[in-house]
Image (cartoon, rainbow, N blue to C red):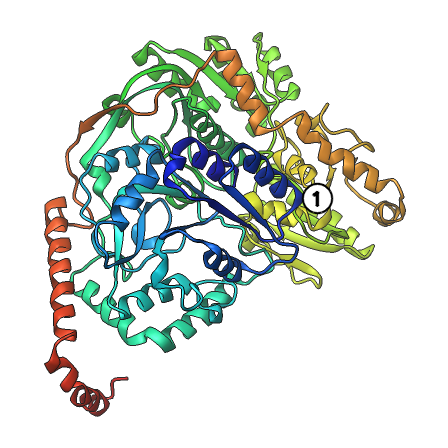
Amino acid sequence: MDYLLSSLLENTDMAHLSEILIGDDASDDFTRELIAGYAERESKIRHVRREHNLGFLANVNDLFSSAQSEFVVLMNSDTIVPPNWEVRVLDAMQSSQEVALACPFTTNATNLVLRSNDGQHWRDVDIILSKTAPTYPPCNPVVGFFVCIRRDLFISEPLMDPIFGKGYWEDTDLHFRSKSRGFKNIVIDNLLVFHSNHSPSFSIEHSLGTINDQNSALFMRRWKSEFESASRELELLGLPSKRHSLRDGVTLASRNYREYQILFVLPASVASVGGISVVLDFVDELNHRGIQAAVYVYGHCDESFINERFQTSPFRSVDSIKKTVKSCRYVVSTSWDSHDIAEGLAKYFGASLGNLAQGPEIAFNNGKFAPMVLGNYPRNDFIFSVSSYIDEYIKIGGSDSVVLPLGPSRLRYYPAKKARNKKAIAVCLRENPLKGTGLALSVALMAQRAGYVVHTFGHDADEWRLELSDVVSHGPLHGRKLAELFSSVGYYVDCSYMEGLGLLPLEAAFCGAIPIVRSLHGLRGTLRDGINCHVLPSDFVPYEFFASLSASAEEEGIRMEACKVKVAVSLEAAVEKLIQVLQLSPESFEGEELPIAEEPRNGRSAQEWERLISHNQHLQEHVEQIRTSTSWRLTGPLRIIGRKLKGIN
């Protein structure tokens, strides 16, 4: 929400807007205060506060019914808009009186997705699009993350059909309702809006698969023939998916030749490693503050992890870096095995070489890497460490580091508005033996004997077969979904044997779940036993330990102190310290645009895709002419009889 509202205020000419309606659907105190702060800064923001949760569709319908302008833009809270977005939306809607609905390209929304090139921020893609003359092709279908609506065409009934309950398929239903009335739904093809696809509309208790299946069945009962007809047309053209009627490779036409201030080098990009997420979050936060930052991943790169969570696409080869990076001030390694690559890039650009030390790498793999780690430290121009614990390891090698006050993001991790079960604990299941999952589960079982409910989560959760009663498994969780879990339990158990920092215990503390840890390690100085956390008395935890917690009157005081940890450490505080030390300053985002060679996609060249899309639009127009003709209407009964004879529904 903070990213959306800040982008609205920074990137919008308010003369084009009549008002900004924010439907605050009984949110938590943190979100309410955040919105209220922005409302004080901008008089056109109207904060619609609800005491009771209406649900996504009812909230949208109520806001739409109170809007007064000719055009209404529906935005999800997990979107970010670029400069001059409102001008491009207005131009699209005013291009024809027949346009009812319009959507931009985005980073996450099935048929409207445009993927970035290596090293590109989503804003790079928008800059390229903004310089392109729009054609406003048909949108098949519109997606509700960001949709502009011609208000007077939909005021006679609820905008979103309440039959779809909490959501899913309601936007596709709106698309076909518009089409059935003869209106046009278009793509604003000179605009890209960031969408993280992490809207808080659904909680961890919701079964999204069940909701999707139920609403899909409702939708198909209403629009099956129209939907399947559109799908068959796309299949005939060999397009990538039933919901892809638009080319997804416009960014192949050009890249931005940019001057970067800082480039991080990562050995891999996978969701299950917290240190990787920290670096990618650093890059996003730096770019959000106007600092030109990028990341190079030379190993395995989980595309879905990157596309769903982050605003910047990593560089995946040194060649792509050399082609598109004009200059770079700092190159930073993030592990012992990324040092040599970072050093080579630093020499190429004449940049300063740094290291972000997140773990006690000297001790990894029984000390196997110690000689290389110790040899690397003196070769850096600067070293950042994430805790005083890591700083001590660096001093062993005769070097010094600047300790960053790193922690979770204050904007993601805070107590949600949920009933907290103080006799519930959360445990993260991870396969890495150093994470101590086996010990954590034994502790959890002892807690269960004392009457606690056990919640498990993690990317490796499927590897653990827990056939126990009262164990609630959530699978992989991160961001606000993880914060929601931590806001609903009393404790988080972490039995890691070696942590350079310990982000999960801090994330739990930020949300009011008291951390129970095996040892403090990187948390030393931030968490204190009996003050804002509990340190296990031994690897074998007796039943009485948990029984005493539930009986103690001091636990609420410890919980309050745990929440205060965010004052000392956070992602935002660490980024501020890094900017201060390296003397980084905001710069213009736009770089020099360079054409690059087109590349084949799915076995076809870009020119072949252009012909297919053009042919697809021609077919759609031809089919529309046939369906509106008198002969089509008069022969309808014969077609129905023919389908019945062939056994086709």
- Residue 643 occupies which quadrant of the picture? bottom left
- Seen in the picture, residue 200 relative to 497 is either above or below; the reply is below
For image coordinates 28% across by 41% down, the residue present is 88
Looking at the image, residue 448 sits to the left or right of residue 34; the answer is right
For image coordinates 83% across by 41% down, the residue present is 555
Quadrant (top left, top right, bottom left, bottom right) of the C terminus: bottom left
Q: Which residue is mark 1?
A: 492
Front residue of 294/139: it is 139
For image coordinates 71% across by 50% down, the residue present is 489
Looking at the image, residue 639 sits to the left or right of residue 268; the answer is left
Secondary structure found at label 1: strand
Type of amino acid at the residue the image marks with label 1: Tyr
At which x and y percent is residue 141?
30, 60
Front residue of 61/298: it is 61
Q: Give the mark count.
A: 1
- Seen in the picture, residue 67 relative to 573 is either above or below; the reply is below
